[in-house]
């Protein structure tokens, strides 16, 4: 078929698929579609046919922000958890006020409570109990303590809303249309709530079981597969990818075929995945191969992976960098495990500015959060509990045990000396918040107790974590950086012109590679590979290395062998390579 004929055929065919969804009068619909196939565009066209209120839900903040920009006023768009918190603020559930505080680290705090009270619960135990809808003592204890703190976090917010509406004490919100994206990322708790929503509102679900990578939070591709087979849902697909080049699409087919051949991805939903050549022909011709860069070494004194990436970035024309920034996505996306990412960032930050890289997430309780809460309410159980986490361990345990057994507020249990000491810090923080001058002694005290500089305190004051979760970005967050470094899980919802997937090594006794078990990769790892590669708009690099630190003779990942060799250009990156490319 001639190029022009192919373009015309694909354009007409793609319109046929989207029109079938838009024009369908079915109450419940499901779209199974791969990445970059126009789900958001289709959502918009469906919602344009609806009058009244509409709701759009997805799993992660990046995608919720994209939906908000794409859909505008056609629907209120949220992450799943943010929407449940919104409902809680106007729903009279038992135990908490509608002006409760959202505190993401609440599970960490309540797990500490449990251990102080000799209850052998871990944070993961509690998460599993909520996500798997286990009606057990962990859930009961958590709800009891979160009531005490008048606060919620992620899983318990969904659980509270679900149980409230299942009890028929209130009417579920009614919408002209609900659209749900990334359904494969939802766990049993979240699926149960979607099922409740579908009782009162027409629902359109979209997802792809080939992108199911969140098994660590009890998400499962089985949920979308079950929904796909329900008689109440009419099935649709969107097969044309406008993001990835032809070589990426072919490689994904190779990966899926090999996975099925070795008995993986069982019960997978069959779907077509086709490069949309009217948009991607030129970029496909310019980038006909996936680059496998095998680096001879990577260590602090010979950071060959980082140096190679630097050289490739320097080849990118300025107009491409500007085009990506103008369209709100990074030009370069570096994806890999944290021990690689950390070293790559340390090197690249010396050569480029504005790199978007979040180092390991701080999971510790921050005493500054406690002080901020006490500014709003001097008797807050949550505020005092956060500050107590920094107290002497014996005093902490005695205080929590007394408050728990006697059902007393922490403000009534803690000593006057302890209270006065920390309320002095609160008073100084109030002055900083209000722009009032503080003495040198007060500066010393507040920085010592808060663990932050005065400048940091001034900078973070007034930034509400719930506003950020709901998509109200700061100016700094709104700026799109040319380079972003993240893990595979963190890459979900992102795309870039140039994608580097590092750590593509075989596992050995002394080095963990990808997949972890070369002879038996998990479905989750296979899906991770698909997700990572399909972030690519133009060129994809699979980067392996022969040595890392003091570990030598590392082989390349078996996943690279799953891809047809004709689709790969292999290069060896060693000292001679850099010498020849100076």
Image (cartoon, grey):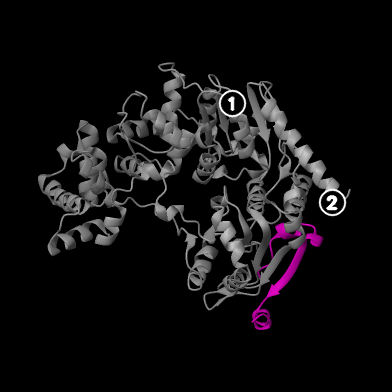
Look at the numbered disc 2 and give the secondary structure of its residue: helix
Q: Which mark is residue 173?
A: none
User: Badge 1: few (under 14), some or many (20 or more) residues near its Cα, within 10 Å?
Assistant: many
Residue at 33% in and 24% down = 94
Q: Quadrant of residue 549?
A: bottom right
Q: Is residue 47 above or below residue 525?
A: above
Whether residue 438 is visible, yes or no, is: yes
Q: Which residue is mark 1?
A: 203
**Circle 2 sits on which residue?**
3
Q: In the image shown, does 545 or 532 lie closer to the viewer?
A: 532
Q: Does the magenta-highlighted stretch encompass residue 253?
A: no
Q: Earlier in the sequence, mark 2 or mark 1?
A: 2
Q: Residues within 10 Å of mark 2 (few under 14, many from 20)?
A: few
Mark 1 lies on a secondary structure that is: strand
Give residue 359's position: percent from left, percent from top.
45, 59
Where is residue 138 drawn, in percent x and y?
A: 40, 34
């Amino acid at each position: 078929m001639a190029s022009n004929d192919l373009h015309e055929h694909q354009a007409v065919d793609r319109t046929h698929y989207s029109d079938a969804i838009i024009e369908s009068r079915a109450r419940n619909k499901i779209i199974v579609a791969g990445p970059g196939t126009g789900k958001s565009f289709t959502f918009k066209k469906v919602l344009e046919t609806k009058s009244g209120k509409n709701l759009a839900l997805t799993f992660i903040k990046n995608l919720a922000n994209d939906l908000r920009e794409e859909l505008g006023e056609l629907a209120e768009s949220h992450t799943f958890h943010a929407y449940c918190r919104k409902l809680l603020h106007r729903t009279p559930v038992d135990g908490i006020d509608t002006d409760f505080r959202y505190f993401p680290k609440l599970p960490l705090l309540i797990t500490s409570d449990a251990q102080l009270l000799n209850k052998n619960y871990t944070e993961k135990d509690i998460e599993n109990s909520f996500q798997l809808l286990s009606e057990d003592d962990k859930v009961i204890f958590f709800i009891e303590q979160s009531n005490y703190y008048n606060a919620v976090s992620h899983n318990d917010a969904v659980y509270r809303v679900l149980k409230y509406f299942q009890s028929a004490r209130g009417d579920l919100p009614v919408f002209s249309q609900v659209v749900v994206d990334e359904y494969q990322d939802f766990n049993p708790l979240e699926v149960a709530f979607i099922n409740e929503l579908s009782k009162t509102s027409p629902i359109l679900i979209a997802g792809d079981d080939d992108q199911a990578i969140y098994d660590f939070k009890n998400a499962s591709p089985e949920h979308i597969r079950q929904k796909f087979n329900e008689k109440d849902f009419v099935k649709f697909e969107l097969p044309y990818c406008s993001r990835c080049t032809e070589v990426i699409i072919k490689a994904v087919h190779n990966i899926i075929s090999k996975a099925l051949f070795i008995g993986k991805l069982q019960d997978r939903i069959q779907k077509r995945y086709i490069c949309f050549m009217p948009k991607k022909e030129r970029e496909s011709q310019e980038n006909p191969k996936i680059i496998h860069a095998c680096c001879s070494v990577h260590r602090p004194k010979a950071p060959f992976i980082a140096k190679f990436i630097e050289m490739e970035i320097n080849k990118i024309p300025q107009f491409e960098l500007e085009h990506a920034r103008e369209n709100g996505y990074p030009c370069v996306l570096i994806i890999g495990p944290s021990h690689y990412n950390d070293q790559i960032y340390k090197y690249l930050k010396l050569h480029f500015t504005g790199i978007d890289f979040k180092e390991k997430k701080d999971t510790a309780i921050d005493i500054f959060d406690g002080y901020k809460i006490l500014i709003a309410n001097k008797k807050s159980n949550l505020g005092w509990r956060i500050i107590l986490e920094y107290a002497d361990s014996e005093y902490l345990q005695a205080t929590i045990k007394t408050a728990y057994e006697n059902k007393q507020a922490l403000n009534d249990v803690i000593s006057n000396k302890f209270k006065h000491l920390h309320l002095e810090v609160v008073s100084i923080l109030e002055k900083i918040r209000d722009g009032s001058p503080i003495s040198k002694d007060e500066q010393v005290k507040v920085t010592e107790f808060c663990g932050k500089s005065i400048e940091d305190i001034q900078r973070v004051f007034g930034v509400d974590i719930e506003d950020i979760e709901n998509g109200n970005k700061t100016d700094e967050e709104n700026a799109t950086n040319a380079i972003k470094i993240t893990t595979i899980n963190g890459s979900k919802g992102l795309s870039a012109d140039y994608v580097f997937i590092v750590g593509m090594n075989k596992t050995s006794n002394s080095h963990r590679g990808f997949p972890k078990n070369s002879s038996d990769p998990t479905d989750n790892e296979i899906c991770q590979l698909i997700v990572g590669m399909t972030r690519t708009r133009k060129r994809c690099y699979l980067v392996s290395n022969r040595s890392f630190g003091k570990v030598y003779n590392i082989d390349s990942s078996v996943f690279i062998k799953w891809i047809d060799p004709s689709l790969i250009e292999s290069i060896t990156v060693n000292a001679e390579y850099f010498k020849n490319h100076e």
